[in-house]
Image (cartoon, grey):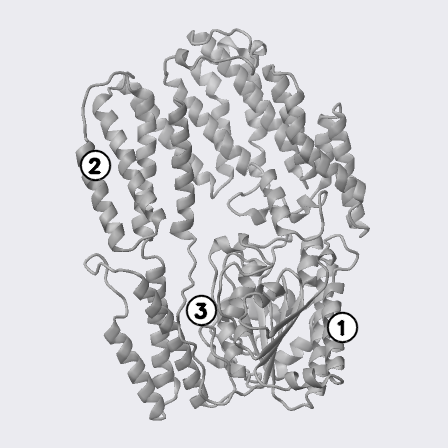
C-alpha cells in the first residue's frame, strides 16, 4: 500500500510539472543577426518615462471639473505629439511589462516568479543595443536590465528598497526622488568633461522609472486622492525634465520622448490579470522623429473611450506593448532587439516614406530571423502538419520587398504593405513552432491522467485476479514512442510525459481483464449520472461562483432525501443550517474589492473567548488605523503577526490527540493567521465552514452506524495516536462515491467561497499589511497563497 501511495505522489508531481513544459515555455531563441535601419535616424537620444501602475483612463479622463489631471501631457497630445493606448498582455506585472516595453517580447506566464532583481535568461533589449543608458528608479526593476546587458554601458541609480512602503505618508516622494536625481545628474555633467562627452554621443537612452503611482494605487486604490494627485505630480515632473533636457542640449531638436506605463490597476488596487483596467495603458510620444498632433473626425475604434476622455477630434493610434521597443530603436537608429516580436508603428514616425520602408523592412527581417532559428530547432513531420512559410516563400518575400524599396516604391500599398504581410506570416510561424509540441504532449498527459484515474478505480474495485499479460504489446508501444522522441531530439522530460501513459495504461488493461466489479450495475449507473451532474456543477462554478450556492442547497437536502433525518434529527438539522449559512458566501462580491474591517470584528465576537483571537483582532484594527493615519506599520503589530504565523504550526502539536481537541486546536491556530490576513467578510467564512465540517463528521458517523459499517458509537473516543490496521479496512460501498464527491465539493467551496483563486489578483494586497508594508513580491505572494 505504501508503494502505491508513493507512486501516486510521483505521478501527480510529474503531471503538475508537465504544465510548465506544455504551456509555460519561453519564446526566446538565440543566434539571430541584429537588424538596423541603414538611414540616418531622426533623434540622437531618447527619454523613456514609465509611470508604473498608471491606467489609461486615469491619465486621459478629465476630472470632475472637466480639466485634465495632466495638463502638460494633455498639451503634448493636442499640439506636438502622437498618442494612443498601449495594450498589454497577461500577466500584467512589472517584470513582464518592462520586458515587453524595452525588449519587445512577451515572457511566458511563469516569468513573473523568476524575480525582478536580475535576468534569469539572456535576451536583447533597447538598453543593450544603445550606446549608453542611464536609469533612475526602483531597485526591483533597474538591475534586471543592467545585469542582462552586454558590456558596462547601462548605469543605474536607485533608492533604498525600504522606501517602497505602502504605509508611507507620501509614496509620491519616490517619483520626486527620480526627478531630482536626473536634474542633479545633468548639473554634475556640466562640470565633468568625460560624462559630458558621453552624454553628447548618439544613440543614448534615459530611463525614468516612476513607482509612486503604483505604490499609491496599492495602498489607497486608483480612485483615491493620493493616486490622482500623484498623476499631477508626475505630469509636472515630466514637464520639468523635458525643459531641463532641452536646455542641456541647447534645444537642438534631437531628443525623442516617450511616456507610457507597464500595466494598469484594478479598482481594488491590484494587477496581474487581464481586466481592461489592467491591460489598457497610455502611450504618448513626441520630439525628434515623432509625428505631430493629427486631427480627424472619424475614428477606427468602436469603443467609447474617446468620448469619455473628451478627445473625439484627436487622432488615436493604439499599439501592442511590444511595439514600443522597435519604435524606440527606429527613432535613435539602433538595431532592433533580436528577440523582439513588436511591429514598428509607422504612424508614430514623422519621416520620409523611404525611411519608413527601410524601417519596416528591417523589422520584418529581424522577426523572420527568429522564425528561421525556431524552425531549424524543430524536426518537422510534414505528413502530420503543414509547414508555414517555406524557404522558397521566405526568399520570394525578401527579394521582392528589397526590389520594391530599391525601385523607390515606398508607399503603404506597395513595399510597406509587402513587409507587413511578411511580418504577419513570420509571426504566425513563430506561434506555430512555439506551440508545435503542445497537442502531442497535452494528449500524452491527458491519456496518462485518465489512465492513472482508471487504474486507481480498478485497484479499489478489483475482487479477484487471473493470469493475463499484455507486457509485450505495451513494450513495443513504449519503444515506438521513445524512437519518435529520439528522432525529434526531444528533452528528457518529454520521455517521462510520453512513456508514463504507456506504463499507466498497461497497469489499467492488466487489471481490467482481471477484475469484475461486485457493485450492482443499476445503482452504479445512477451514481454515475449523479456524479456527472455534480462534476459539471463544479466546472461551471469556476466561472459562476453562485453555482456553489445551488450545490450547497442540494447538499443540505441530503439527510431528508436519504431518510437520515428521521434517525438523527439534531445532526441533520445542524447539517442543513450550516449548508444554508455557507451558501450565502458565494453570492457575496469577491473579497478585496471594498475592504470592511467591521466584518472581521464581527467574527471576533463569535470567538471572543479565545484570547489569541482577541489579540489578533487588536493587531488588525490598530494596523488599519495606523495605515489610514499614514503612520506606518507599528513594529509591535508586525512582531505579533509573524509570531502568530509561526506558532500556528507549533501549537496544534502540543494539544491533545483526541479527535475534536486536535481539530479545534488546528482550527484556532489557522483562524488567527487568517484573521490577520482578512480585510472583509471572509473572516466569517472559517467558522461557518468549520461548523459544516463538524456537522459532516457527525452525520457521516451516524450514517455508518446505521449501515453497521463502523465499530465506533462516539467520535469523541477517536484518537489520532491510535494505530490503524490497514489490512482490516471495511468493504467499499456506493456511499463512498458520495463521500468522495462531498470532499471535492468542499475543497472547491473553501477555495472559491470568498475569492477567485483562478486569479490571485482578486485578493486585496492590503491583506498582508499586518505582516509587512514594504514591497516584497515573494513574501507578499507567499502570504496570499497561504491565505488561499
In the rendered image, residue 621, in percent from the top left (x then y), is placed at 77, 40
Alpha carbon of mark 3 to alpha carbon of mark 2: how far? 43 Å
- Dot 2 crowding, Cα within 10 Å, few <14, some 14–19, many 20+: some
Q: Quadrant of residue 11?
A: top left
**Residue that label 3 marks:** 339
What residue sits 71% from the left and 34% below the top? Answer: 644
Left or right relative to 221: residue 510: left
Left or right relative to 452: residue 135: right
In the rendered image, residue 30, in percent from the top left (x then y), is placed at 41, 67
| Front in this rendered view, residue 189 or 355 | 189
The local secondary structure at tag 3 comes to loop
- Look at the numbered discs 3 and 2 and tell me whether their residues touch, using CB distance below 8 Å: no
- Dot 3 crowding, Cα within 10 Å, few <14, some 14–19, many 20+: many
The local secondary structure at tag 2 comes to helix
Q: Is residue 410 above or below residue 7?
A: below
Q: Quadrant of the C terminus?
A: top right
* Visible residue check, residue 381: yes
- Look at the numbered discs 1 and 2 and tell me whether their residues touch, using CB distance below 8 Å: no
In the rendered image, residue 145, in percent from the top left (x then y), is placed at 57, 66
Left or right relative to 148: residue 656: right
Sequence-first disc among 3 and 2: 3
Alpha carbon of mark 3 to alpha carbon of mark 1: how far? 34 Å
* Visible residue check, residue 223: no
Q: Which mark is residue 474?
A: 2
What residue sits 75% from the left and 68% below the top? Answer: 176
Alpha carbon of mark 1 to alpha carbon of mark 2: how far? 71 Å
Sequence-first disc among 1 and 2: 1
Sequence-first disc among 3 and 1: 1
Q: Quadrant of the N terminus?
A: top left
- Dot 1 crowding, Cα within 10 Å, few <14, some 14–19, many 20+: few
* Count of numbered tags: 3
Q: Which mark is residue 180?
A: 1
Amino acid at each position: 500500500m505504501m508503494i502505491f501511495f508513493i507512486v501516486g505522489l510521483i505521478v501527480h508531481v510529474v503531471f503538475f510539472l508537465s504544465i510548465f513544459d506544455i504551456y509555460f515555455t519561453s519564446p526566446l531563441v538565440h543566434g539571430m543577426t541584429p537588424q538596423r535601419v541603414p538611414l540616418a535616424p531622426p533623434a540622437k537620444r531618447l527619454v523613456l518615462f514609465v509611470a508604473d501602475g498608471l491606467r489609461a483612463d486615469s491619465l486621459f479622463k478629465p476630472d470632475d471639473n472637466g480639466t485634465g489631471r495632466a495638463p502638460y501631457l494633455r498639451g503634448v497630445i493636442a499640439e506636438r505629439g502622437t498618442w494612443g493606448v498601449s495594450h498589454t498582455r497577461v500577466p500584467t506585472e512589472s517584470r513582464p511589462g518592462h520586458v515587453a516595453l524595452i525588449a519587445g517580447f512577451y515572457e511566458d506566464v511563469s516569468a513573473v516568479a523568476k524575480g525582478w532583481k536580475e535576468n534569469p535568461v539572456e535576451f536583447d533589449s533597447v538598453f543593450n543595443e544603445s550606446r549608453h543608458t542611464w536609469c533612475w528608479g526602483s531597485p526591483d526593476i533597474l538591475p534586471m536590465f543592467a545585469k542582462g546587458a552586454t558590456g558596462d554601458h547601462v548605469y543605474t541609480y536607485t533608492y533604498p528598497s525600504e522606501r517602497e512602503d505602502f504605509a508611507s505618508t507620501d509614496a509620491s516622494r519616490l517619483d520626486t526622488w527620480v526627478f531630482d536625481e536626473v536634474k542633479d545628474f545633468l548639473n554634475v555633467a556640466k562640470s565633468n568633461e568625460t560624462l559630458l562627452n558621453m552624454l553628447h554621443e548618439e544613440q543614448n537612452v534615459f530611463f525614468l522609472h516612476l513607482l509612486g503611482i503604483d505604490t499609491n494605487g496599492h495602498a489607497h486604490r486608483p480612485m483615491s486622492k493620493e493616486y490622482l494627485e500623484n498623476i499631477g505630480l508626475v505630469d509636472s515632473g515630466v514637464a520639468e525634465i523635458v525643459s531641463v533636457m532641452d536646455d542641456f542640449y541647447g534645444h537642438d531638436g534631437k531628443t525623442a520622448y516617450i511616456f507610457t506605463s507597464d500595466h494598469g490597476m484594478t479598482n481594488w488596487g491590484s494587477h496581474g490579470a487581464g481586466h481592461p483596467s489592467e491591460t489598457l495603458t497610455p502611450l504618448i510620444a513626441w520630439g525628434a522623429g515623432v509625428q505631430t498632433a493629427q486631427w480627424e473626425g472619424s475614428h477606427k475604434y468602436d469603443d467609447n473611450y474617446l468620448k469619455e476622455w473628451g478627445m473625439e477630434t484627436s487622432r488615436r493610434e493604439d499599439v501592442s506593448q511590444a511595439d514600443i521597443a522597435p519604435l524606440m530603436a527606429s527613432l535613435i537608429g539602433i538595431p532592433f532587439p533580436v528577440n523582439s516580436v513588436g511591429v514598428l508603428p509607422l504612424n508614430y514616425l514623422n519621416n520620409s516614406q523611404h525611411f519608413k520602408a527601410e524601417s519596416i523592412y528591417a523589422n520584418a527581417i529581424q522577426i523572420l530571423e527568429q522564425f528561421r532559428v525556431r524552425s531549424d530547432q524543430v524536426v518537422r513531420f510534414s505528413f502530420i502538419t503543414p509547414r508555414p512559410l517555406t524557404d522558397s516563400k521566405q526568399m520570394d518575400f525578401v527579394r521582392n520587398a528589397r526590389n520594391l524599396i530599391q525601385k523607390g516604391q515606398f508607399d503603404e500599398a506597395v513595399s510597406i504593405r509587402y513587409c507587413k504581410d511578411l511580418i504577419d506570416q513570420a509571426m504566425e510561424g513563430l506561434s506555430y513552432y512555439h506551440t508545435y509540441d503542445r497537442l502531442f504532449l497535452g494528449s500524452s498527459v491527458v491519456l496518462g491522467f485518465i489512465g492513472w484515474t482508471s487504474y486507481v478505480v480498478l485497484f479499489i474495485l478489483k475482487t479477484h485476479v487471473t493470469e493475463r499479460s499484455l507486457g509485450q504489446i505495451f513494450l513495443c508501444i513504449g519503444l515506438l514512442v521513445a524512437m519518435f522522441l529520439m528522432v525529434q531530439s526531444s528533452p528528457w522530460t518529454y520521455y517521462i510525459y510520453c512513456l508514463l501513459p504507456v506504463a499507466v495504461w498497461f497497469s489499467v488493461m492488466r487489471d481490467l481483464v482481471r477484475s469484475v466489479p461486485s457493485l450492482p450495475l443499476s445503482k452504479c449507473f445512477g451514481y454515475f449520472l449523479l456524479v456527472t451532474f455534480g462534476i459539471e456543477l463544479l466546472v461551471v462554478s469556476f466561472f459562476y461562483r453562485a453555482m456553489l450556492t445551488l450545490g450547497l442547497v442540494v447538499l443540505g437536502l441530503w439527510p431528508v432525501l436519504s431518510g437520515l433525518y428521521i434517525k438523527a434529527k439534531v445532526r441533520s438539522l445542524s447539517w442543513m443550517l450550516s449548508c444554508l449559512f455557507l451558501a450565502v458566501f458565494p453570492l457575496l462580491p469577491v473579497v478585496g474589492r471594498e475592504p470592511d474591517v467591521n466584518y472581521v470584528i464581527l467574527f471576533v465576537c463569535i470567538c471572543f473567548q479565545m484570547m489569541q483571537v482577541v489579540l489578533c483582532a487588536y493587531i488588525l484594527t490598530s494596523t488599519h488605523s495606523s495605515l489610514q493615519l499614514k503612520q506606518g506599520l507599528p513594529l509591535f503589530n508586525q512582531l505579533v503577526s509573524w509570531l502568530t504565523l509561526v506558532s500556528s504550526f507549533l501549537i496544534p502539536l502540543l494539544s491533545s490527540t483526541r479527535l475534536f481537541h486536535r481539530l479545534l486546536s488546528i482550527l484556532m491556530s489557522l483562524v488567527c493567521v487568517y484573521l490577520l490576513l482578512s480585510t472583509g467578510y471572509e473572516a466569517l467564512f472559517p467558522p461557518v465552514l468549520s461548523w459544516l465540517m463538524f456537522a459532516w463528521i457527525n452525520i457521516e458517523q451516524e450514517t455508518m452506524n446505521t449501515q453497521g459499517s463502523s465499530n465506533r458509537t462516539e467520535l469523541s473516543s477517536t484518537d489520532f495516536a491510535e494505530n490503524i490496521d490497514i489490512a482490516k479496512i471495511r468493504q467499499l460501498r456506493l456511499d463512498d462515491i458520495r463521500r468522495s464527491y462531498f470532499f471535492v465539493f468542499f475543497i472547491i467551496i473553501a477555495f472559491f467561497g470568498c475569492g477567485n483563486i483562478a486569479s490571485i489578483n482578486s485578493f486585496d494586497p492590503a491583506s498582508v499589511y499586518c505582516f509587512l508594508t514594504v514591497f516584497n513580491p515573494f513574501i507578499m505572494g507567499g502570504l496570499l497563497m497561504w491565505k488561499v
